[in-house]
Image (cartoon, rainbow, N blue to C red):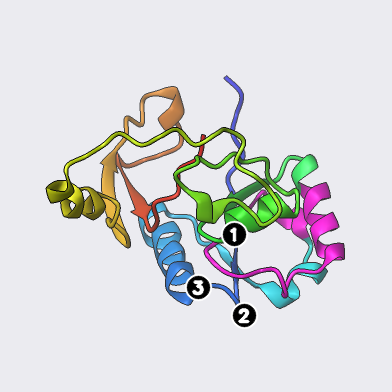
C-alpha cells in the first residue's frame, strides 16, 4: 500500500460564494471529519501559496467575476502538480468552462452545461408517466440541504485513515454527472 498524505484543505469563501454552503462544508470538515480547513477568501486566491494545500474546495457560487485568468492559470498548474479540486453547485460548470475540470453532465441536468457547450449525447424521449404521479416524481428531486450519516468500514482500504465508522454526506443539489 502507498501511504496517503493528510489532506491540507483550503475552503474558498467570500464574495460570490454561497455562505450557507461554505458554512456547512466548514462544519462538516471540522466537526465531523476532523479536518480543519483554511478559509481562503476568493479575493486572496491569486496571491495565496497554493502549494500549502493539496485540496481546494469551491462550493456553490459565482466565480466568473472574482477569479481572474492569471489565477485560473495558477490553479491549472496546481492541479497538474497533483492538487485535488473539489467542486459543488455552480462551481462545476464554471470549472468546466475554465478548463479546470473535465466533467460530463447528464442531459437531465441542462442547467449545468456551460453556455456555448452542447450536451454530448442526444436527449432520448422520456418514458411516458401518468400525470397523477408527477408530484411524487418531482418530490424525489427536491431532497436538498440534507446531511446524511453514512457508514464506512475503516478496515477496508478505501476507508483507510478514518477512525470512526461514520461519515457525513451532504446533499444540496440534483446534479448528475456521467
- Circle 2 Cα neighbour tier, 10 Å, few/some/many (<14 / 14–19 / ≥20): some
Q: Which residue is mark 1?
A: 91
Label 2: state its secondary structure: loop
**Horizontal and vertical percent for residue 68?**
81, 69
Most foreground residue, 77 or 123 = 123
Residue range corresponding to the magenta coloring: 50-78
22 is higher (above) or lower (below) than 112: below
Q: Quadrant of residue 150?
A: top left
Q: Residue at x 81, y 63 (%)?
A: 71
Magenta highlight on residue 74: yes
**Horizontal and vertical percent for residue 59?**
54, 62
- Circle 3 Cα neighbour tier, 10 Å, few/some/many (<14 / 14–19 / ≥20): some
In the rendered structure, find residue 15 and report the number of the disc placed on it. 2
Most foreground residue, 20 or 96 = 96
Marks 3 and 1, how far apart at CA:
10 Å
Residue at the far bottom: name it.
15
Q: Is residue 84 left or right of residue 110?
A: right
Most foreground residue, 138 or 150 = 138
Magenta highlight on residue 40: no
Amino acid at each position: 500500500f502507498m501511504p496517503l498524505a493528510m489532506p491540507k484543505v483550503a475552503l474558498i469563501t467570500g464574495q460570490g460564494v454561497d455562505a450557507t454552503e461554505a458554512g456547512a462544508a466548514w462544519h462538516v470538515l471540522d466537526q465531523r471529519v476532523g479536518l480543519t480547513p483554511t478559509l481562503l477568501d476568493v479575493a486572496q486566491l491569486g496571491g495565496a501559496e497554493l502549494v500549502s494545500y493539496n485540496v481546494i474546495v469551491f462550493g456553490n457560487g459565482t466565480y466568473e467575476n472574482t477569479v481572474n485568468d492569471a489565477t485560473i492559470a495558477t490553479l491549472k498548474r496546481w492541479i497538474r502538480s497533483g492538487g485535488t479540486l473539489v467542486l459543488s453547485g455552480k462551481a462545476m460548470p464554471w470549472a468546466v468552462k475554465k478548463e479546470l475540470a473535465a466533467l460530463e453532465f447528464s442531459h437531465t441536468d441542462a442547467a449545468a452545461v456551460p453556455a456555448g457547450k452542447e450536451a454530448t449525447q442526444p436527449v432520448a424521449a422520456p418514458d411516458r408517466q401518468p400525470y397523477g404521479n408527477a408530484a411524487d416524481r418531482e418530490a424525489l428531486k427536491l431532497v436538498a440541504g440534507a446531511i446524511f450519516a453514512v457508514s464506512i468500514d475503516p478496515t477496508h482500504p478505501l476507508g483507510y485513515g478514518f477512525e470512526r465508522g461514520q461519515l457525513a454526506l451532504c446533499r444540496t443539489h440534483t446534479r448528475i454527472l456521467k
